[in-house]
Image (cartoon, rainbow, N blue to C red):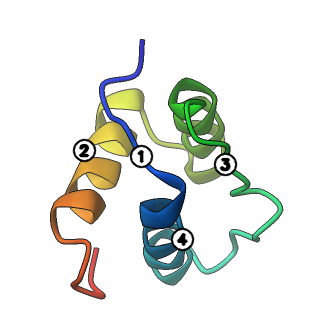
Amino acid sequence: MAEISISSKDWERVKIKLQRKYNRLTDAQLQYTEGQEEELIQRVMQLVNRDREYVVFTLKKALVNIDNNRL
């Protein structure tokens, strides 16, 4: 069970933040369907070579500061 919930609207902003932090990530790699948070977390873990705790923390941080461009 994923510890976070991301709406499709919010994901667009979060995705941009992730791509700024990890500029090698493509739109195709970061495709997301609402309700598929667990799959997203697993995929991002592999793409950025970080553990689950870090990825969840990063996504939560992006959601809390959704209007801020920084991650």
In terms of sequence position, does the residue under pointer 4 or pointer 2 come before the other? 4
Q: Where does label 2 land, which residue?
A: 57
Residue 31, given in percent of the width and then of the height, sits at: 73, 54
**Quarter location, residue 66:** bottom left
Distance (Cα) linking label 1 and label 4: 10 Å
Q: Are marks 3 and 1 in contact (CB under 8 Å)?
A: yes
Position of residue 2 in the picture relative to residue 66 (left or right): right
Q: Which residue lies furthest to the top in this view?
A: 1
Which mark is drawn over residue 32?
Answer: 3
Query: In the picture shown, does residue 31 fall above or below 53?
Result: below
Q: Where does label 1 land, which residue?
A: 6
- Of tags 1 and 2, the one toward the viewer is 1
Position of residue 5 in the picture relative to residue 26 (left or right): left
Q: Where does label 4 land, which residue?
A: 12
Dot 1 amino acid type? Ile
Query: In the picture shown, does residue 1 fall above or below 16?
Result: above
Distance (Cα) linking label 4 and label 2: 18 Å
In terms of sequence position, does the residue under pointer 1 or pointer 4 come before the other? 1
Query: In the picture shown, does residue 53 fall above or below 31?
Result: above
Position of residue 50 in the picture relative to residue 67 (left or right): right
Dot 4 amino acid type? Glu
